[in-house]
Image (spheres, grey):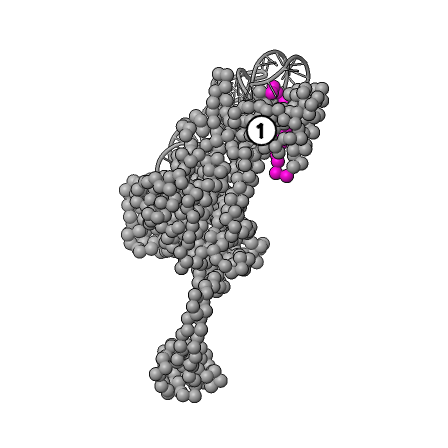
Amino acid sequence: MDDFSAERLSRLTGILKRRGVILPAFEIHGGAAGLYDFGPVGGRLRNRVNQTWIDHWLSLGNIVEISCPTVTPYAVLEASGHVGEFSDFLTECKACGEASRADHLVEDLHSNPDSLPKEKLEELLQSSNPPCPSCGECGWGAVEAQNLMFNTKIGTGSSGRQGFLRPETAQGMFTSFSSIYRHFRERLPFGAVQTGKGYRNEISPRQGMIRLREFNMAELEYFIDPEIEPIHDFSAWTQPVTLIADGGKESMNTIGEAVEKGIIRHPTVGYFMGWTMDFLLKVGINPDGLRFRQHESDEMAHYAQDCWDAEILGSYGWVECVGIAHRGCYDLESHEKATGQRLRAWRTFQEPKSVEIDGWTIDGAKAGPAFRALAGKVKEAIEGLDSTASFPLTLNIDGTDVEVLDEHVKRRQFTDNQTGEWFIPHVVEPAFGIDRIIWHLLDHCYEETDKGGENYSYLRLPSSVAPVDVCVLPLYEKDGMGELAATIHRDLCSKPGIVSIFDASGSIGRRYARADEIGVPWCITVDHDSLKDGTVTLRSRDDGSQTRVGISDLPF
RNA sequence: GCGGAUAUGGUGAAGUGGUUAUCACCUGAGGUUUCCAACCUCAUAUCGUGGGUUCGACUCCCGCUAUCCGCACCA
């Protein structure tokens, strides 16, 4: 592992800015905190990392890609819990000016202060007047709501509905559950992936790409039947990885061992940890700077059964870049409750269950006119009685005594054959912060060496994510070398998925250095011999080796 | 959001209350050069932004914006 010194960090950010990889957005207007551009080189890098991620998960075979809007109606994020969760009530200490969360200050006075409205919090704060955790003084200002989601309006004027820019992509997978379920012919398990922008109006974005207000996310929602024990093959992962379990206990285990020992509580969570690791290594993360950390029980959302973060070591220390959470049935259930729509899967019983029904129900034609508005509740009450009930009978419905006569009811006797049941699938969710991953792979692939007494830097990106595949360089721009090189360049650019750069300015060594600095894996050099025999030099970034190949035999 | 520091060409830095604001690298043009940042000539900034003090401000003062470091918040 390289040492991540502050000096190296500033050299790296300098190169990334100078070469157009990552740069502060809207700089000519003074910039904007938490917003970054991927420049002419970075744009393709982001795209390739993104596509590699999608292809990686699609290769599982039962995953589908979807794409949902970033503008999201209020109701969706209210149902998901984000409206509540992303609103914090802050208050300032009158003595030292320190901002604190109002609900944290009154923690001892209420069982769930997070759920309280602003007025109630203010009241509790005034009456108890807790000391400031920073200076110890007692005296608090007004409570202010702080929402971390970007507000917007869908539609104009008074007909506009309140909405938010989504704080995560996941909700789209839940709200589209029915169509994904149908797509997979109603057979679990299956998953849906989505990549795209997410927005969080952070109070103070810091540390470059680590904490952004608009960021690239990539999430998989994998739906499973909680009653079927998942079977996964862990044999591919033979290298032990660092695991920090709930409670802080650190161990080295293979993923398979950790599942077997119960350190990882759910096999599917473990399986996706393995897939996550494969992806991170594929795009260029150094395995020595990768570890998994389990959320503490009190840190996890109440519905989560197990949650592991993939943390990557870089210039900013260990940073969480992926979260893999077993979310139970929470999300689908929340949307089901809010909408009344069925977000369930059908489970067929191995053997149909026969239930003998023997009881009573109402005779609609008679009971309807007799009980009018109360008929529905009477029916409910009658169907709750067992077969031994006898009529007439007096029921108390909502404080009203109702006389149910023999003619109002009829016997209900049949065998109910249940072949299966509807259930809410459980969800395992790997969620990736693409920007954080891109930052770390740049950090890990950036290498400073010495070449002939001079500083020399490489970006040793894997060729699968390198933003430029090849540079075409005429040794000199005369005698037709420039023209031949330009032709080769255009031919390469016309091939799907290939990006080539034509560079004829400066000495050949300088141009190799420029290519190395943005991680171009190959350079093609056109020289005098090329004009005679149609061969060129193919030069490798990683070892500097050169081979002579025919133009028609180029490996692109 | 609070406290501290900073803001000068593409990058990293120097510098001064007063005529054409330095240096290195980078980038571009031309020359030279037969494969790893060579060399020569030339070119590129109204010193973050808005205001104030002053005969005169890049330099002093204030607001704003941004960056960095703590705290708080957050994944």
Q: Which amino acid does label 1 sit on?
A: Trp
Residue found 30% across the figure and 55% down from its top:
A110
Front position in the image: A334 or A496: A496
Residue found 55% across the figure and 39% down from its top:
A48
Instruction: Give above or below for A273 relative to A223.
Output: above
Quadrant for residue A356, please give it.
bottom left
Quarter containing the N terminus of chain A: top left
| Residue designated by label 1 | A522
Q: Position of residue A83 (x, y in %)?
A: 44, 53
Quarter containing the C terminus of chain A: top right
In the image, is A393 to the left or to the right of A452?
Answer: left
Front position in the image: A16 or A191: A191
Q: Where is residue A228 in the image (x, y as percent from the top left)?
A: 41, 58
Is any part of residue A444 visible from this angle?
Answer: yes
Residue found 45% across the figure and 56% down from its top:
A224
Q: Position of residue A67 (x, y in %)?
A: 55, 50
Which region of the structure is painted magenta? Answer: A496-508
Instruction: Give above or below for B22 relative to A553.
Output: above
Instruction: Give above or below for A481 relative to A211.
Output: above
Instruction: Kindly report the secondary structure that dominates the magenta region of the rendered protein.
Output: loop
